[in-house]
Image (cartoon, grey):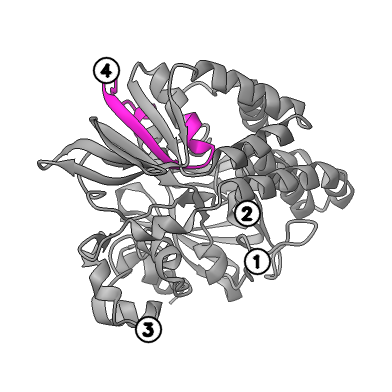
Amino acid sequence: MSHRRMHAPVLIAGAGPAGIAAACCAAESGATVTVIDFSPASGGQIWRGGKPPDRLARQWMDRYAKARPEQLLEARIVSAVPSERKLLAELPGGDSVAITYEKLILATGARELFLPFPGWTLPGVVGAGGLQALVKSGLDVRGKRIAVAGSGPLLLAVADLLREREANVLFIAEQATGASVSRLSLKLATMPTKLAQALALRARLASIPYLVSCWVDACEGDGNLRRVCVQQNRRRWTVDCDYLATGYGLVPNTELAELLGCESGADGVAVNSFQQTSADDVFCAGEACGIGGVDKALVEGSIAGYAAAGKLRAAEELAAERAKQREFATRLKETFTLRPVLRSLAQPGTIVCRCEDVRLSEFAAREGWRDAKLQSRCGMGRCQGRVCGPAVEFLKGWKPSPARPPVFPSRVSTLIADDEVES
């Protein structure tokens, strides 16, 4: 195992669309750029795996290749030292690196929101985005019976990929009402590009039932998933299946921003008109500062990249496009707001914290998140509350504790390596 140090004039944490846009704009403005990401290839979840999915993705990936930023892939950031403008990361094979920076752009993306319900821990019950990633990485789903359920536009994208890979997609269950979805469709009429994308997607999914005001309230099986129980208004029925792809939207990844002392806003990390956070020389773009999709991520990443490189005029010229994308993000949030009845899906015996096998009944006498952690170890397992924290916030209204280092399980040698080198 070895440890090294490096310096990055502009360091970008995350190689999804926001990070790619930031890297392109900063590098094209003359800055020396380094991009760090945990994945083995750039593109993030949305552009993961092989050939970019559409013309927009290909344009940005080609531009990124020409920008030629230095890349640290398969590198997981585990801690930060704000006073020294330094991040610590673990590399494959047990190596580690300490990176100091002059400007830092956080493009850390988001993760899925899971809501507990009876049977959700059965093998075969997978996050919608998780199954998408597995399929892009080579999982063969040909002929598999797959139900897709939860909330948000990700369900449609996942169903489209599964259809393309010859899976038998049984239905898409969307918990939002038909009226809400229809209002969003009308809004798309003012955004021609998004309207064309939506119409093309719906055409490809025309043979798959799209059920609104509908959700899965239980899964059944004999060690593996065998069937799902579906609820729509007052009707309830069961469907045999091999996989359930489920997810109730996205949660911004703000842990690194919290370690750096960045203030939070209503939807994620708070930023100003140049995507700058409350921490000196730290910017944030994309889903980490508000869920809104790839177009929002690209324009915010572009603004952050220009601003970090000192090209404020170029950043300002993108303000109108960002405003349009943020307004659409607000519409998405309103459309797919989770209905209160989903809080009743979990039963007293339902596991809420999978890492520590904590059941809902164990929260009955607790007064808040900290009390629950101390008494039940909820949120103290390997995921450090990334899964159960947002679920408990939805179920109980308890805000998870602020992030503390390390933000991911890491080796002690990584955390002390830079101090040992210095001494």
Is the Cβ of the residue at disc 1 closer than 8 Å to that at disc 2? yes
Is the Cβ of the residue at disc 4 closer than 8 Å to that at disc 3? no
Tell me the kind of residue under disc 4.
Answer: Gly
Magenta range: 134-157
The mark found on residue 265 in the picture is 1
Mark 3 or 1: the one toward you: 3
Task: Identify the residue at the far front of this view.
Answer: 234
Residue 164: image x %, image y %?
42, 17
Is the Cβ of the residue at disc 4 closer than 8 Å to that at disc 2? no
In primary-sequence order, the first of circles 4 and 2 is 4
Q: Is residue 279 left or right of residue 211?
A: right
Residue 353: image x %, image y %?
28, 63
In primary-sequence order, the first of circles 1 and 2 is 1
Q: Quadrant of residue 236?
A: top left
Q: Residue at x 75, y 54 (%)?
A: 308
- The residue pinned by badge 4 equals 143
The mark found on residue 397 in the picture is none
In primary-sequence order, the first of circles 4 and 1 is 4
Tell me the kind of residue under disc 2.
Answer: Gly
In primary-sequence order, the first of circles 3 and 1 is 1
In primary-sequence order, the first of circles 4 and 3 is 4
Q: Residue at x 82, y 53 (%)?
A: 310
